[in-house]
Amino acid sequence: MKDLMLKIRRFIQERDWEQFHSPKNLSMALSIEAGEIMEHFQWKTTEESRDLDAETFNEVKDEIGDTLVYLLRLCDELNIDPIKAANDKILKNAEKYPVEKAKGKSKKHTKF
Amino acid sequence: MKDLMLKIRRFIQERDWEQFHSPKNLSMALSIEAGEIMEHFQWKTTEESRDLDAETFNEVKDEIGDTLVYLLRLCDELNIDPIKAANDKILKNAEKYPVEKAKGKSKKHTKF
Amino acid sequence: MKDLMLKIRRFIQERDWEQFHSPKNLSMALSIEAGEIMEHFQWKTTEESRDLDAETFNEVKDEIGDTLVYLLRLCDELNIDPIKAANDKILKNAEKYPVEKAKGKSKKHTKF
Amino acid sequence: MKDLMLKIRRFIQERDWEQFHSPKNLSMALSIEAGEIMEHFQWKTTEESRDLDAETFNEVKDEIGDTLVYLLRLCDELNIDPIKAANDKILKNAEKYPVEKAKGKSKKHTKF
């Protein structure tokens, strides 16, 4: 992950693109790429979304790649460790959604 | 990364939430979380986005954590290796954006 | 629609918020609000999404209100007539998706 | 607006697309289109976003058209009057953001 983050940083520096990579712009890029993943699923049923043909699978894989690239770029610019951020957030989520209350329910914790 | 993916899978299984985690629903969750990161930057200038106060920084870190959680959940459901997806996509991006053409420019490759 | 656009403009001017309402920032706000609509549907089945309880219905209605507000703000700043933009786009969509080809299919026109 | 909503409904019915237009799917389509508007602004400065060239302007206008189409489709399926939804929400926003407190500030009301 750290290697990938550094590789992406070099890719950007070689192209002189740091000037465009403010956290603000990167948050937009990340959201746009996440929307492009979603585009492949919008008209599919739940079941169809579990069973992609090879072409769609590869397109989704590419969009996932771009999404991770921008997520890591954003983390790099903000000096955030993404693995630690996820682990810390999972601890908070475990408190907000204790197993006994949340089991089998899709409600938001504010609606328990 | 693999450890984190498995940890998140267990979190979901303990709560009996696999039923909600179709790729379709996960792509929505990922896009929503990416929007929540962006919410912290929408009214900030580029410069302000580089210099967050401690409270905003922690909120952004939490949203980044949630975004990575859903990205890994989606990869887990689709059986995609996110690091490989990013590396493969970077190769394609390097072809679409060769240094000599892309240097210092923010244009989309289709507009070169 | 024109009245609503002017009413929103006054709301913004009274609060001295024009300084924040660049088209760039408004496009972010619009996307964030659209994400907040989606948040109400992410874990629902297709069927459940057609049959909202009163509380959720009112929350969705509020998010739709905010989304239209930012769409009209963006149109106002760019001097675009949203009704004309939609009518013009429907003409293009009718060409891309002729009835005989598109009937009953959810495929993108590039995949016909 | 009402005319436009009915025109879009006919467009959909002629193509037998009602089956795809659950509120859930329409909320995804709306968010995706809002992301496509944003794509034109992601690497632009605030100033550049106010001064689009003719080609970009027309592309943004088209995306705005699509966004309004899906917003009206969603309102049609949920039986929501979008103008009333916006007017009702503006009243709530006026309470959350009274002029004397909100003037010149971009903070969220929860941070006043």
Image (cartoon, coloured by chain):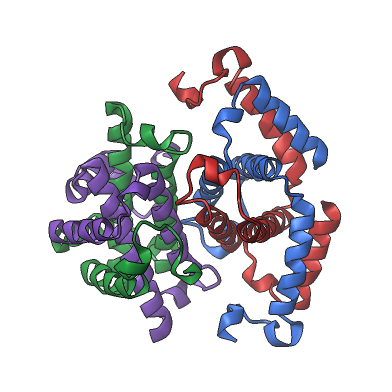
Chain colours: A red, B blue, C green, D purple
Q: Which residue lies furthest to the front in this view?
A: C100
Query: Which of the two residues, D104 or A18, is positioned nearer the viewer here?
Result: A18
Note whether D70 is above or below C101 in the view shown: above
Q: In this view, does C108 lie to the left or right of A68?
A: left
Q: In which quarter of the image is residue A77?
A: bottom right
Q: Residue B93: x, y in percent?
A: 71, 72
Q: Residue B107: x, y in percent?
A: 58, 80
Residue B69 visible within the image: yes
Q: Which residue lies furthest to the top in this view?
A: A100
**Number of marks in the image?**
0
Q: In this view, does C111 lie to the left or right of A50?
A: left
Picture residue at 32% right of the left edge, 73% below the top: C78
Q: Quadrant of residue A88?
A: top right
Query: Which of the two residues, C68 or C91, is positioned nearer the viewer here?
Result: C91
Residue C15 visible within the image: no
Q: Residue B56: x, y in percent?
A: 58, 44
Q: Residue A96: x, y in percent?
A: 58, 22
